[in-house]
Image (cartoon, grey):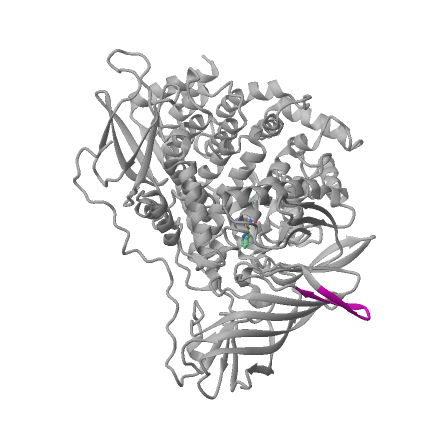
């Protein structure tokens, strides 16, 4: 197809700059250390080549000491060496550069920058910088930290590192930016009985009394954020790749059999990625370790990948099917990073999405290869939905985002870098085709191996390999926030398309994209592809399927299988034709999902009525597929939430209608697993039961309570296997009050007594799911006790119901000081805000919340506050729209079959 009318020019992004330039070198001579305060990036006039790092952790005193010898190259004349260090005591008398002693050793605390000033210009060329330092094994799950575990009934400490993004500087002085790649040679001094691991295998071990000294092989060129150390007591299972690389999964003593599934996925992933990226796994070994206290889900340290328990361990008896899937996705994701991220590294955090978006996308490719029956690409649409939701806020941000200061990096580990990143990669993959995409990717990995790359470097390789305009196409998606809605209108037998930026507040932003349009109909054998490039103009395509004038089947679905990162709004006639195609079962799974998801968003933005959304939703009754039902379920939950405020008089009827839609697939599956049923049905059952409990379906609640009562006397009962437990637990919570707390106490007991990570999280995540003030507060306050590890502090907030929002908000305000002090990771504080603020749906509340945060923000969660407030305003607008919507009550009655 060619554009019918070229009135406007193509979008030009060549002037966009998202890279924060490195600061210029200071004047050749003179100046003081103070000139480096407040800098985002280290100056480039010296660069490390090699680190010789020796560390001695004391696991009893929770301290460590170390020495580092950094071989570096001075490339421009300077009197200063400027590197990173934070929360370390650097022994200033130990600092030497070659034979030179610094005249100044200054640590800028807020910036994590260490400046060494010398009396005269440093000689150009290589030299060795040496210093001694010491620090604390902290409890903040970052830098070099302490984690706790039980061994033979006693509490023990382990020493662990977590350096991404900017915390290697908390363990040793270093050039802590991804582009300063160097080789690392580590030596660890640890108690002889412990296992000590690092990125590389041990080269030799010597013993000195109760201490052993482990010298590790030298690493290849790598970034500081990927250096890792783990010291503790472990047990492992071991496997081997086809190329003979040794792979191990380390767990706590007694749990190694729970590492087998991850080991299997790990070995398969290494085998697959070597072929997919066209480059062998770069290191001699790979270890994966379960860490009891862990801030993220998992971390891709080169050759020594660390995980939360629940992201690595799988037990046939006590884990759920969705837990199994999470392990598979997480392992594949972290191992993809061994190439995408570790071998080829982003040049600066602006390009973080290259790491995270690609690892997310490739993990799905891998899991789809290993477990085709999971239909993981249909499940991936959950990720696209999440990204589209966040990216339809004014307070979203582009995929490539400017980072000026280390403190800003944390908050870009969000759905834009991960889910939008992965979604636009899927879009490119679909546009180029699998083979061309893979060839180009492999060529990129080869070209930038052991080095760094920016987003445009990737596009340049893609352009060269495929001859397609990849740079212009993709830049429109990565350098501006948001995405378009394509307005599709019938004109005769043709369709007119027009793009406009979609925002959930109902307005239309200025954005413009190069949109890969696909259209399909019939048996999807007449798919068409073209690029919609214009700003205001329209493209006309001949309608593919059927002839409208002759009547019959003329439907056309745009954005086939949701591979594009955009929404489609059809005019009435096209919409009706699609709804007909839906009812007559013509559409693919992914297209069913796309239509519902777009309609939901258009309804929130008030471009479509709630009544029409309900009518569409009603067409999905009888649906049996897991992924489709998972979207039906989230739309259902969203409608139930909004009708609580928007149509209090009608809320009960709306709940009945939503129950009617979900009930028949739920009844087909029942509570009991069936022999030989599919993985997806095993996951579908709990999803439906949970939804019915949450919608207040009496029969399901009663059955859940009945099964729970049997379960508390017999934890092995076949009536409540791990997959359906959450539904029963939630059912129990529905009847709990301060004066009727036996069910609650029984759940607390399950939490206390269970040794399984997944089970403990399952219980912790529902304890606040009731409306009783005393119980809600008791559950939230658990985060201040020893019962909840700080890594899990966000979990008790997961269960909060709309009805309990005032209780939770008052709790957050009253405990704010405590929370912001004790919860060190700002992303965790962000999780608290995200769990509570969007429960509100009025502008008055939005301003109250906004006032509270006016004096209480920090770079780590500032954007989260803004996004959460915007969500409240969007809900408020939706509520007002629904209130004045004519005919809603009648539609609900009609669909319910009430007179
Ligand atoms: N690189 C991240 C871990 C990370 C996250 C480090 C945030 C620092 C800040 C890792 O590769 C990752 O993405 N982990 C995910 C799991 C994955 C399956 C999406 C996580 O931790 O949730
Ligand atoms: Zn990742």
Up-down relation of residue 712 to residue 547 (above or below): below
User: For the image shown, how many numbered marks are present on the structure?
Assistant: 0
Quarter-of-image position of residue 147 = bottom right
The structure residue drawn at horizontal position 41% and vertical position 23%, both measured from the top left corner, is 616
Up-down relation of residue 122 to residue 762 (above or below): below
Quarter-of-image position of residue 58 = bottom right
Q: In which quarter of the image is the C terminus?
A: top left
Relative image position of residue 735 (x, y in whole percent): 66, 32
Q: Quadrant of the N terminus?
A: top left
Relative image position of residue 227 (x, y in whole percent): 59, 61
User: Furthest-bottom residue in view?
Assistant: 119
Q: Assign the magenta stretch its main secondary structure.
A: strand
User: Furthest-front residue in view?
Assistant: 243
Residue 875 visible in the picture: no
Residue 308 visible in the picture: yes
Up-down relation of residue 684 to residue 510 (above or below): above
The structure residue drawn at horizontal position 43% and vertical position 48%, both measured from the top left corner, is 443
The segment highlighted magenta reads: 204-216
Membership of 482 in magenta stretch: no
Which is more toward the observer, 98 or 808?
98
Up-down relation of residue 196 to residue 78 (above or below): above
Relative image position of residue 52 (x, y in whole percent): 61, 71
Is 77 situated left or right of 530 in this image?
A: right
Is 408 situated left or right of 9 in this image?
A: right
Quarter-of-image position of residue 77 = bottom left
């Amino acid at each position: 197809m060619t554009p019918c009318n070229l009135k406007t020019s193509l979008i030009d992004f060549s002037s966009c700059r998202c890279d924060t330039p490195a600061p210029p070198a200071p004047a050749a001579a003179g100046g003081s250390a103070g000139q480096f305060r407040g800098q985002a990036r280290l100056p480039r006039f010296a660069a490390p080549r090699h680190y010789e790092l020796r560390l001695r952790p004391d696991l009893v005193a929770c301290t460590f000491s170390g020495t580092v010898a950094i071989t570096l190259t001075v490339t421009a004349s300077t009197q200063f060496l400027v590197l990173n260090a934070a929360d370390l005591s650097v022994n200033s008398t130990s600092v030497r550069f070659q034979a030179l002693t610094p005249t100044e050793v200054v640590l800028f605390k807020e910036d994590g920058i260490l400046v060494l000033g010398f009396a005269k210009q440093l000689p150009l060329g290589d030299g060795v910088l040496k210093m001694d330092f010491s620090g604390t094994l902290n409890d903040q799950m970052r830098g070099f930290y302490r984690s706790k575990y039980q061994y033979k009934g006693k509490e023990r400490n382990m020493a662990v590192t977590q350096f991404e993004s900017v915390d290697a500087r908390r363990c040793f002085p270093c050039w802590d930016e991804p582009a300063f790649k160097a080789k690392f040679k580590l030596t660890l001094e640890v108690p002889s009985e412990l296992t000590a691991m690092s990125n590389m295998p041990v080269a030799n071990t010597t013993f000195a009394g109760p201490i052993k000294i482990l010298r590790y092989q030298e690493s290849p060129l790598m970034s500081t954020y990927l250096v890792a150390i783990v010291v503790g007591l472990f047990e492992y299972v071991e496997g081997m790749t086809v190329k003979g690389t040794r792979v191990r999964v380390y767990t706590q003593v007694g749990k190694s059999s729970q590492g087998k599934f991850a080991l299997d996925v790990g070995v398969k992933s290494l085998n697959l990625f070597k072929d997919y990226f066209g480059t062998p796994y770069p290191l001699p070994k790979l270890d994966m370790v379960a860490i009891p206290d862990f801030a993220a889900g998992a971390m891709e340290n080169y050759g020594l990948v660390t995980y939360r328990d629940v992201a690595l361990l799988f037990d046939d008896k006590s884990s759920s099917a969705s837990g199994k899937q999470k392990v598979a996705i997480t392992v594949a994701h972290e191992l993809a990073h061994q190439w995408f991220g570790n071998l080829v590294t982003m040049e600066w955090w602006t390009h973080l999405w290259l790491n995270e978006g690609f690892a997310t996308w490739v993990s799905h490719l891998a899991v789809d290869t290993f477990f085709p029956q999971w239909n993981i690409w249909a499940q991936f649409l959950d990720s696209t939905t999440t990204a589209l939701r966040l990216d339809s806020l004014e307070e979203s941000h582009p995929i490539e985002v400017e980072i000026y200061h280390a403190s800003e990096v944390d908050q870009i580990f969000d759905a834009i870098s991960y889910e939008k990143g992965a979604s636009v990669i899927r879009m490119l993959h679909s546009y180029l085709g699998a083979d061309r995409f893979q060839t180009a990717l492999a060529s990129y990995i080869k070209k930038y191996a052991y080095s760094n790359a920016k987003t445009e470097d990737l596009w340049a390789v893609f352009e060269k390999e495929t001859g397609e305009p990849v740079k212009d196409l993709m830049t429109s998606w990565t350098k501006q926030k948001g995405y378009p809605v394509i307005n599709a209108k019938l004109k005769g037998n043709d369709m007119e398309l027009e793009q406009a930026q979609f925002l959930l507040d109902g307005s239309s932003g200025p954005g413009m994209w190069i949109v890969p349009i696909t259209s399909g109909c019939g048996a999807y054998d007449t798919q068409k592809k073209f690029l919609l490039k214009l700003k205001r103009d329209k493209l006309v395509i001949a309608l593919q399927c059927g002839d409208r004038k002759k009547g019959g089947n003329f439907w056309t679905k745009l954005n086939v299988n949701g591979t594009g990162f955009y929404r489609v709004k059809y005019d009435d006639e096209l919409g009706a034709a699609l709804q007909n195609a839906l009812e007559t079962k013509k559409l693919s799974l992914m297209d069913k999902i796309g239509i519902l998801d777009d309609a939901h968003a258009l309804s929130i933005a008030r471009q479509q009525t709630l009544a029409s959304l309900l009518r569409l939703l009603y067409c999905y009754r009888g649906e049996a597929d897991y992924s489709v039902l998972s979207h039906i379920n989230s739309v259902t939950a969203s409608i139930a939430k909004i009708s609580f405020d928007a149509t209090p008089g009608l809320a009960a009827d709306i709940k009945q209608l939503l129950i009617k839609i979900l009930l028949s697939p739920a009844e087909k599956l029942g509570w009991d697993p069936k022999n030989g049923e599919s993985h997806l049905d095993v996951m579908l059952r709990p999803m439906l039961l949970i939804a019915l409990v949450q919608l207040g379906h009496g029969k399901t609640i009663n059955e859940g309570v009945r099964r729970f009562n049997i379960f508390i006397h017999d934890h092995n009962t076949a009536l409540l296997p791990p997959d359906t437990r959450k539904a029963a637990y939630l059912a129990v919570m529905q009847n709990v009050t301060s004066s009727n707390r036996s069910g609650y106490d029984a759940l607390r007991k399950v939490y206390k007594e269970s040794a399984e990570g997944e089970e403990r999280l399952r219980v912790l995540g529902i304890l606040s799911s009731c409306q009783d003030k005393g119980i809600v507060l008791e559950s939230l306050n658990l985060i201040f006790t020893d019962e909840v590890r700080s890594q899990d502090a966000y979990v008790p907030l997961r269960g909060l119901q709309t009805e309990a929002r005032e209780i939770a908000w008052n709790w957050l305000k009253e405990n704010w000081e405590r929370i912001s002090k004790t919860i060190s990771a700002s992303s965790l504080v962000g999780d608290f805000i995200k769990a509570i603020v969007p429960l509100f749906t009025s502008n008055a509340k939005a301003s109250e919340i906004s006032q509270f945060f006016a004096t209480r923000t920090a770079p780590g969660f500032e954007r989260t506050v803004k996004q959460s407030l915007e969500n409240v305003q969007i809900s408020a607008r939706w509520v007002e729209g629904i209130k004045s919507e004519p005919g809603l009550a009648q539609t609900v009655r009609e669909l319910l079959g009430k007179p």
